[in-house]
Image (cartoon, coloured by chain):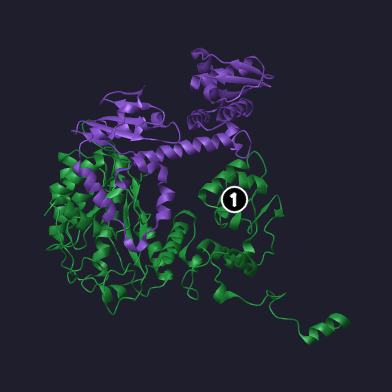
Amino acid sequence: MELQKKLEILSGAAKYDVSCSSSGSKRKNTKVGIGNGSSCGICHSWSDDGRCISLLKILLTNYCVYDCAYCVNRISNDVPRATFTPEEVAGLTINFYKRNYIEGLFLSSAIIKNPNYTMELLYQSVKILRTQHRFNGYIHIKAIPGSDLNLIELTGQLVDRMSVNIELPSSNGLKMLAPQKEKQSILKPMGFINSKILQTKEEKRIVKKTPSFVPAGQSTQLIVGATPDHDLSIIRLSEKLYQHYRLKRVYYSAYVPVTSQNPNLPAINKPPLLREHRLYQADWLLRFYGFSAQELLNESMPNFDTKVDPKANWALNNIHLFPVEINRADYETLLRVPGIGVRSAQKIIRARKVKSLDMDDLKKLGIVLKRAKFFITCKGKYNGGLDINDKLIRYALTDDVKTYDITTQWEQLSLFPMLDSMPTLNDNFMSITGEI
Amino acid sequence: MVNYYYDGSFEGLLTSIYEAYYKRQSPYIAPAQKSKQINMFEENFQIETCQEKASKVYDAIYKKISYDALKHVYHAYLSELDGVSQNIYQYIKLGFKVGKKVDLYLTDESVFPVHNASRLVRKETHLMHGLIRFKSFDDDLYYASYQPDHNITALLIPHFSKRFSSQNWIIHDIKRNIGAVYDKTNCVITDMPNQIYNKQIFKQDQYENLFKEFFNSICIKERINPKLQKQFMPKRYWKHLIEKQ
């Protein structure tokens, strides 16, 4: 088969893997080698769906022995199949890299024959890249669940990031859609990689020349919307993964209906993109803003509000903590104000060292006040224009002209829409007589 | 009102600041080619670039303000925005007054235009680390043309000479007619006429087609979002991206 045809099939089959980051590795170039890692990561292009292309994302093969219902490469699906040889993968990577098309390689694979055989092929490909081509760029590789741990360890010494995809956030979902896979077999390599990374870190402290092991850490992916799991269980799972397996990232992939008619899969036409977006927002809150999953959602409200973002939602539910004074609040408190992110909070902290800030100063700092203005005071002055009442603010935040659907949401305006109950006749009498 | 016009070089800008300080004037500083109309009622000076004076100002910024300030000044200068020379002058003046604290005055009229300009430059540099596309001449010389908003060619050199240290390459800014040339050991920036940029001399490269193929097949059709794509990768850069041709 022609290389072009193979590339078309195998990159098309890899596109549902969302991970693309190339950050976290500081691998240096060698004298006769090519490439290096960039710790902040570099995107090289953006495809028509707006997702960045930083790595050459391909499968080694899409011949698969498994039959997972959500997956486009399952054995029962009638799609064209192809296999790269390890040399072809290495050749493509190095030539794309020389022209600065990509930041490195993301190599995944369907399970051909058995897990060990597949892992062996993946190992061969990166070995050729690292030793024959002296490639020092970024390599992200999939650890195949069920393969030998020695093989995973050998591969880990060559690559920058490894990942094991969990895909379905609960064991029930796994049973229903991927009956051949088990939760334990997925978590085992994850735990192994984690302990290996820790061990290497410790050894590096003593012997500086210890060979690196997965320096950019490991990541995983969860499919959103293929199973009936709530956002709460997804976000709790992510929190556990960050704490116990010290993952760098959990990716969320809105389920794209790739298969026709399986009674266990939801019948949807469009991928749930907004839900995916809300999960990513919550994920950032977990990692960079000091939130816990329990704060964001609870059993009585297990899914995110589609109209307001998770942080604004949290703030509205905890309105008694607001407003905060911009000139005095500490960093952690500033971070919890809707509309103020890490960068804005840092800017505020720096700028207020020499000057106390007012509303105009915040605008000059480039802080988006659309949401923040309801939750802050500047020099003691509140500029939200509304009472600090969660219902009023929620109304103001969601009542966006663009999302306002006239046909379903119009109502007769009332002078007292926000009062808990209308005054009764008795109340009117009382207001005249003054007797209670 | 006093106007200083300098030759457009970074040293020229620093010399103007030197002159302003020692002549005890507070002029309006601008690069010569950009000044459109000369007002006959104002005093106009052509500042002659002097290496010695420039390096004095350079050292003074480093010692009396900070390394960060020096970086902001240089990056802001490279932005080539209208009026940025004057902003830099105001920024340095404040810097000499308050020292390294100058970068805390984020809301000050003389600080935030400079910070803003230097941020734009660093942002575009980072973007170009990814968007530069090399064309290969027989696997021996790699040539890339591009048209950046700001004069960032010099800032691209460290990244590419580390990454492609065993490869001859040229990065050609066809908007400003300058180029960075690297020969596996050294890198220089030279004038480079526009005529070099000629699509005809490149042979068909199979990897270009392969990359186009990859670019198309990696996109999920159900999620097409051109607005998001343009937000990350503005259309003005597409001319030099082979996947978009």
Task: Determine the residue located farthest toward the right in the rendered image.
Answer: A433
x, y (%) of residue B235? 41, 46
**Residue shown at 30%/66% (left/top)?**
A167
Image colour assigned to chain A: green
Crowd band around label 1 with a 10 angstrom C-alpha radius: few (<14), some (14–19), many (20+): few
Find disc 1 in the rendering and name its residue.
A330
Above or below for A341 versus A434: above
Task: Determine the residue located farthest toward the bottom in the rendered image.
Answer: A426
x, y (%) of residue B227? 43, 54
Helix, strand or loop at mark 1: loop
Above or below for A293 versus A216: below
Can I make out residue A157 in this image? no
Q: Is residue A315 left or right of residue B229?
A: right
**Residue shown at 32%/61% (left/top)?**
B221
The quadrant of the picture occupied by the N terminus of chain B is: top right
> Toward which corner of the image does residue B198 lie, by quadrant?
top left
Image colour assigned to chain B: purple
